[in-house]
Structures are given as structure tokens and as C-alpha cells.
Amino acid sequence: MTDVAAVAAVRQDVTIAPDPRRVIIKLFVPGEDDAVVRARTRGLVDRVARLDEEETGRLLADIFDRFGARHHDLEDTFRHHYDLVGHRIARARDLSPSARLLVGAYFSHEYAVEAAALCNPSMVAHPDQAGLDAGQLRVAVSLRQIGEGHLSSVGFATAVLGPGRRITVTDRGGPLIVGRRVGVRHHRDLLAAGLAEQDCDNEVTATVLDALPEQYDEATFERVLAELPPDLLSRSTGPGTLEDLRRTDAASYATTFPAGTALHQRVLWPATPAESNGLEDVRLVRFTDEGGPTYRGTYTAYDGRRIATRALASGDLRRFEITPMRGPGARNKGVALFPRTVDGRHLALCRTDGESIGLTCLDAESRWQEQIPLHTPRDSWELIQVGNCGSPIETADGWLVLTHGVGPMRRYAIGALLLDLRRPERVVARLPGTLLAPDDGDRDGYVPNVVYSCGGLIHDGELWLPYGASDARVGFATVPVAALLAAMVEPVRSGASG
């Protein structure tokens, strides 16, 4: 089948381009990939420490003059970096406050979070809807931003939709702020599910799980470990099991931002070993069950070799709670949560086999079950693989699922499915051909020949579709929902697939 559809999305003129001025400060350890790292860092610290106070003051004044306006609380960052390397200073107590700041500055560097690419957006209604005119909606846009070394993090933008097809993106200027990790309430069933996935089941883990309450904090967790019987810890598997317990528990955490920071200044940065090579493809959704609207989402954590699916939850897009997603339905990339429960079930789209769209349900033990097949590669534009482009969007006619397909020359395009509103296991319609495909203006970039989205929304009868164009920029397209639904046709029935 050709990739020409009966209806096509209309590209809007507004785009978000990567901005190399958007920088954060990272710890810089000279030669950190070198076997002589310890000698080099200690030598640098010694050289900085030998500077007299006048020279130290002059250098600090120059640093703050050059970089102060580009960052939030530069002094606090330098103090933190000093604390991380201070153990290498033989006479740390003798250093003046200004000398400690300077040591921190030498162990810091700027990192341009989106210098390489900007892509894979999702869009949700913003928590602040004040000050708008009739027909307008303020939206929050999540962005995958990629810098040196192909390291991904999550950024944000704010825009106003309407009236009509008008979109205005808020200026993204100002210093960026990396979220600070804070304590979180942990869930025993998630810890148990994580240990089960690692086949870590012995007397130590059973004793710990039995002693923990359903929800617990870090202090309770460490107290339970400290109270383990010595005869269990003395076994050959004891130390390794404790390491597994701590690593699995640490996969759940929270990160928060100062109250005065704008959304576009916030950066979700890797905070655990499993995320060390990036946070990829956040699929945000506004969840409307269970006590009022909240923001939920999923993303892929990458450590350089393995991927893992993570869930996030936030009431205000300022504090984010991160938890692992467990079970066979959460394997591989592309999990996307439904915006509400369906018949009491928490559901998600998934792609556990790497090439087809499925449906998974959360069980009573917080494990995502085996996928129910929904749609497999069928048409010429999607024969390599298919997946979702974000969470399902509720309409009166059913759950609208934006899909992506990969065709010849690894060309990505966007299509659509419609799922039954009460029984999402059933595909009731599909769009013949594509809704949005790379044109001549989209095909060149960091990853050529790709249009890709992590989620859109409906406003005033229009489907708003943010999309990454070859990872070079983020664009926006619209299509009337009624026209899109009218263009969809009943699927060809073939086995279990839609």
C-alpha cells in the first residue's frame, strides 16, 4: 500500500530549533577515562591550592563575570563540586572559602544539552492556564535533547495553542537548572518485582521483604538491612545480595526544582547508573483518574549497553517521582500509558517484540503483563517496525493511537489507529497510509528521513501533533479530528492483529 492517506496533517510555521546556548554545569575530572586519573586530579588540586589569596580572588571574579549570568547559583555548584573532590586535598581544612570555590570551578565545565539534536516531543496541557483568551490552551512540551557524546536528557518548552491553528512558543531563555535528587516513598511490591526479574530470591531478600512495610523511606530500608541476622549475611551470597537490594531500591527516586524556575529552565538529568547514558523519549500524559489530574509518563533509561523502562509522576511538573516499570509488558522501548483507567484497569501501549504494537495491563503485583497484539507491520511504509507515537487520545469514537512506522532507507512516518473505547484490545479502524511523512524540509538532520512524536493532544476540534524532524528541530502539525476519524477504515482482520 502507498503511504498516501485520505487525510494529511498540516505543518505549522513555528518550530523549536536546538540552541547551543542552553548549557548546564557538569563535574569535570581531567583524564577521568585514564588510568592516571587519581594522580592528575590530586596534582591539579595541589596546584590550585598553592595560589595566593589575591590570585584566587582575581580568578574567581573573572569566572563569575564570564559565567555568572549563564547559570543559576554558580557558587553553590562550585561548592558542591569541591565537596566531591575535597577528599583529595591533604590540607582541606586550611583552604579559605574562596580557594574552595576556585577548586570547584576547576572541576567544572559547561555542557550544551541540545548541541547535537532536539527531537521526540510530547505535549500535555500546562498546569498553569491563567491569563489566556478564549480559544487558547497553554501546553507543556517535553523534549529529548542530545549533547556531546549522544547523551540524552529531558527538557521542556511552553507554548500557547489557539485561537484556531495559531501556536506561540514561549522564549526559552534564562539559565537552566538540573533537578536535585530528593527522598521518595518506596513501594515494596516494586522492589519485589525488581528482585524477581534478576532471579534474586534467597533467604536475605525474603527476610528484607517480609520486614518492610508496603511503603517505606530510605531510613527504614537501611534499618531493615542493618538488622539482618549475621548468620544470613555471613553466607557467600550475602554481600552480593545486599548490593542487589540497594541497586534495585535506588531505581526509585524523586527529583525537584526550585519553585521560582520556569518550566523551560528545568532539565531532567541522569541520576542513576541505569540512566548514565541518557533519558530518552518521554511520553507525557495528563492522567485524570484517582483523585484529580496528575502528570504521568514513561521514558527509556540507557546505561550504554542496556535499556530499561521508567515511569514518572508529577502533580505540577516541578517535582517528579521516578519508578521502574516491571514485568514482560515493560520490556523494550515505547511504553505509553493510557490517560485514565479503563474498566478499573491501568493500561499501556507497548512494543515488547521490538516491531509491533501491543497492549499491556498492570497486575496486582505492579507488573505489566504480556502484551496483547494490536498491530503488526503490514504496509510498505511500516514493514521494518511499528510503534506508538505517545499515549492514546480519548475521543467519542474510540482511543486514537498515533503510530510510527519504519520503511525503506529507515524512513520514519506517522499513521493512526482507533481502539474500542471500552475494549482497547480491539482495533476498530486504521488510517490507510500516513498522516505525516518526511518531506524535503524534514529529511536532513542528525538522524535523516525521520518524523517522530511522543504524544499530541486535541484542542478545539484539532489534533495537535508535535514532531521531531530528523532530530534537527521540533515542528507542529494539525489536522481536524473529525476529518481524521472520517478517513479511517475498518482494519483487515488477520489472526490477532488489528
Image (cartoon, rainbow, N blue to C red):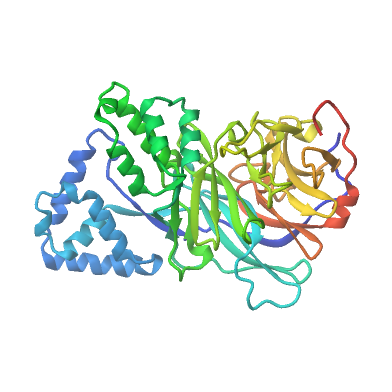
Which one is in front, 290 or 431? 290
In this rendering, the answer to whether 323 lies above or below 104 is above
**Quick check: 83 left or right of 96?**
right
Where residue 430 sits in the image (x, y, percent)?
84, 41
Q: Quadrant of residue 289?
A: bottom right
- In the rendered view, tell whether residue 246 sits above or below residue 7: above
Q: Camera-side residue: 218 or 385? A: 218
Q: Does the image show residue 436?
A: no
Q: Quadrant of the N terminus?
A: top right
Q: Residue at x 77, y 66 (%)?
A: 165
Residue 104 appears in view: yes
Q: Position of residue 364 (x, y in %)?
A: 60, 39
Residue at 13 percent across and 56 percent down: it is 49
Which quadrant holds the C terminus?
top right
Q: Image check: 317 left or right of 275?
A: right
Question: Which residue is found at the position 55% from the left and 40% from the top?
Answer: 325
- Left/right placement of residue 101 relative to residue 405 reads left
Give the x, y percent position of residue 68: 34, 68
Q: Position of residue 459 (x, y in %)?
A: 76, 63
Q: Is residue 196 above or below residue 167?
A: above
